[in-house]
Amino acid sequence: MSGNEVFELESGTGWSRGLSNMLSSGLARWFKTKTWWIQSLIWGGMVAIIVSTLVFSHREPAPLLDLLMVSFIFTGLFPAVGVIIIMQDAIVGEKREGTASWVLSKPLTRQAFVLSKVIANSVGILVNMIIVPCCLAFIIISIAHKTTLFSLGFFGAMGVIFISHFFFLSLTLMLGTFFNNRGPVIGIPLAILFLQQYMLGFLPNLRYVLPWNLVVPLGNTNPLVLSLIIGTPVQSDHLILLLVITLESILFLLIGLWRFNQEEF
Amino acid sequence: MSQTQPYVIETHNLSKAYKNIRALNALDLKVRQNSIFGFLGPNGAGKTTTIKLMLGLTRPTAGTATIFGMDSVTHSVDIRSRIGYLPQEPHFYEYMTARQTLRFTAEFFFKGPKQAITERVDEMLELVDLQEKADRPIKTFSGGERQRLGIAQAQVNYPDLLILDEPAASLDPLGRRDVLEVMSKLRKYATIFYSTHILDDVQRVSDTVVILNKGGLVAEGPIEELLAGSEGVIYIIHLRGEVDAALEKVKTLAWVSGIKTSLHGEESIWQVSVTDPQAAETQLLKLLVNGPVVVSEFRRKQYELEDVFMQVIEGGQDVRK
């Protein structure tokens, strides 16, 4: 139609058509609304209060390893609840509210739609639910124990926590492409999150397919994040677990992409 | 409208079934460039399904839909880059403002320049009279305001084809009038395909109409032809005087295919069916006024779209021109 000569037209033809626009909008939703500080406040505030209590409520701060362990539980385990709630809204919420069919009536591929949700939410979760709480916890612990914990291992530990959260992110996203109501999309990942400790009791081999031991101790086995922080050698079991969780997450994403491509609006 | 103009939309045997429910059954449609194409039908007739199939939001169980010569399944994104679409119930991201929504929509089509996008967004806000509410989050918008925003976002990309699903729904009479004006203005640049329940609107702006019922096409044609009725061309004549002699004379005319007569007081009312409207137009009245009768009314029978709609929906008649 005449009138659009002054514009530089979007002309991509591949799977990524519309991705940058959706991604900008997804990131803006995290960082240009109240979301970023609310999430930072919830998760950062929670870990800061718990760690501060353990540090400052006694004459001597709690032992370093205990403080680190508590920090990892509150940055690596509980925020997964937030990840699940945020991600169920990303697909099911948009399907139910009709916004998915609206944006998909524009030149946007379904792959770009799904990937924009994955990338924007991964960045939001990494910054507000991992980096901010971890930094707060580690600053408090470093002050209390007069030591610096900000090493390569610190960044590695945050990476592992991210992979653990990404497992729930991709699982929830995949379920969102199969179901149209929120119950199973929230319920299944939450059940896995909270029941994995019991499941590991019955079936110990599940330790290779569930992310529990990435961030939480399993019996006498320290979590991978602790090994990275304190600089002890990483066990091969942990490397296998890390690899399997990464592959599972990729598989969930691929299944989600395939299923969303079949979706009818 | 020139017959050489290409078709913007062509569907062939287009069908859609959901489990065992047939939502659309072997639809054949041809929509010419720069036409305003009214798509009518009762609830559940398959209108929205057809639109969703054209947009690639759902896949046909049989048949094809071709838009701008491209298949709606394999070239869906290319097709959508030339379309503006207003859904039946527009849903937008509630946290965005109207201005952000329009910019977000525009950026699916345009990379820049930013200033031109900003100007286009302002132009659209003005078109739908939302300038004052442009920076309010959409969650505070009423149904009518959402509808206006929907109309604006559908046009922001200068579409070649505008698909509007119930564009006048949730609008007050002034809003409805504005939408119809916008549609009339856009015809120069775009083809408009729209579904509606408001038959009066269709009659006012459409040049071609299709009526769907239970997933099938039951009436199709240029609006004037549909309004001329399915019974052929009929002239209504009110007259008094020596009507019997006049009646015998009219019956002998070669292009008169039938006459129904009735009495209303002293007046006789004829419904004369003709096969040659031009001959009837020029000769029939002349013949009568030269005879021993007084003609008080002479007109071609016109149908309201509502009559045609009721005929085909309730009477199950197939009216294809």
Image: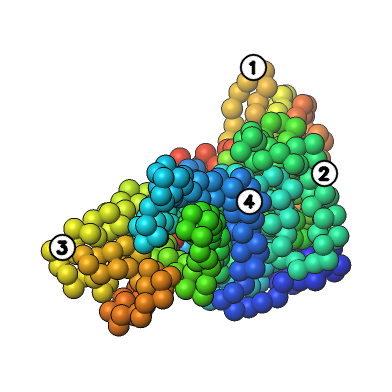
Q: Secondary structure at mark 1?
A: loop
Please report the residue visible at 74 percent of the width from the left and 41 percent of the height from the top.
Answer: B135
Label 2 vs label 4, nearer the camera: 2
Q: Nearer the viewer, residue B27 or A223?
A: A223
Q: Which residue is mark 3?
A: A201
Q: Which residue is mark 1?
A: B265
**Chain letter behind tag 2:** B
Residue at point 64%, 68% (across, down) = A20
Measured as percent of width and height from the top left, residue B91 is found at 57, 46
Frontmost of labels 1 and 3 is: 3
The foreground one among A143 and B54 is A143
Tell me, yes or no, if residue B45 can be seen here. no
Residue B230 is situated, as x and y percent measured from the top left of the image, at 57, 48
Nearer to us of marks 3 and 2 is 3
B227 or A2, which lies in front? A2
**Residue in front for this viewpoint, A223 or B85:** A223
